[in-house]
Amino acid sequence: MKPGIYPDISNVDYHAGDGVSKSQLDMVAINPALLAWQKAAPVDTEKLQALDMGTALHCILLEPEEFSKRFIVAPSFNRRTTAGKEEEAAFLKEVSGNGMTVMSAEEGRKLELMRDSAYAHPAARWFLEQEGDCEASHYWIDQETSELCRIRPDKRLKHFPVLADVKKVSDMSRFSRHVEEFRYHVQDAMYREGAQQTTGEAHGFFFIAVSDSIDCGRYPVRVFELDADDVSIGHTLFRRDLNTYHDCRTKDEWGGVEIIKRPEWARRQDMYL
């Protein structure tokens, strides 16, 4: 894969293709062997069509014209009656095998409310309504390691040097913890780097967080930009993990055994033995 921006690579081909991604660096940060495992482990294809509300939310917000091609919202069935169960079974049989993900009527209703909640937030609406490229794949050669790197921003605005990333959350008050848990600060660093390398321009990075849990009858929406200190730490971790990946790949040594400790609360109890 040559460096550049590719707007038409499918999500499946992107994840199966060349280059190291942020999700792969997440595994390297835990143990490089996990990356080797992921490439070799079998995939349970029966689970691939299961509904992922986060994927559906991304689609309806960023690529609404694609939603009807990838998802089917089922009619409402009365499962308390025999007729309702039979109607549901007939519907599922009719749509099976078409490669699309089926959503229940309730899931479809909830998703529409989450979409409308996102558009009700002034900043989120501004990002979503701006002209830009959604799900385009960016590739570049890292100058320090010569590794091919890749990112796939949710949205890169056309007229502003800005990247926007949609996150589905279950509890908005925990989003700062999600930054640490899912290493969003590393994503921030790698995506900024990728955008600058492929466009020649420094970019800002913003999270559009949409909750799938109701708070006072509404689905909360917030727009976040990382604190400068966390941006700096994310960059340090990105460089560390990319260098580790490069070292493992060039030596073809991925490790495997991890050290595990008992929980801290259990270790503290040892003090009283």
Image: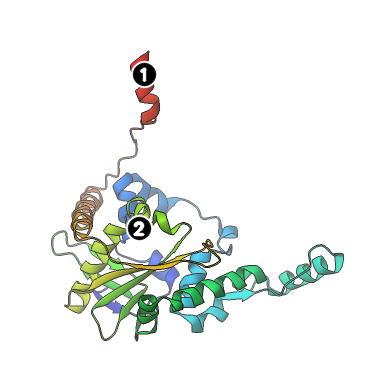
Give the residue at x 20% y 49%. Answer: 247
Q: Please state the horizontal and vertical placement of residue 261, each as a whole percent of the image.
A: 36, 30
Q: Please state the horizontal and vertical placement of residue 240, each as a whole percent of the image.
A: 20, 51
Residue 101 appears in the picture as rendered? no
Q: Is residue 60 left or right of residue 182?
A: right
Which structural element holds mark 1?
Answer: helix
Mark in the foreground, 1 or 2: 1
Which structural element holds mark 2?
Answer: helix
Q: Residue furthest front?
A: 216
Q: Nearer the viewer, residue 201 or 251?
A: 201
Question: Tag 2 or tag 1, which sits nearer the N-term?
Answer: 2
Crowdedness near tag 1: few (<14), some (14–19) or many (≥20) residues, C-alpha within 10 Å:
few
Amino acid carrying mark 1 in the image: Asp
Quadrant position of the N terminus in the picture: bottom left
- For the residues bearing labels 1 and 2, Cβ distance under 8 angstroms: no
Amino acid carrying mark 2 in the image: Ser
Q: Residue furthest top?
A: 273
Q: Please state the horizontal and vertical placement of residue 23, each as a whole percent of the image.
A: 35, 58
Give the residue at x 55% y 71%. Answer: 111
Q: Which mark is residue 270?
A: 1
Give the residue at x 29% y 85%. Answer: 158
Quarter where residue 210 is shown: bottom left
Q: Which residue is mark 2?
A: 23
Quarter where residue 31 is shown: top left
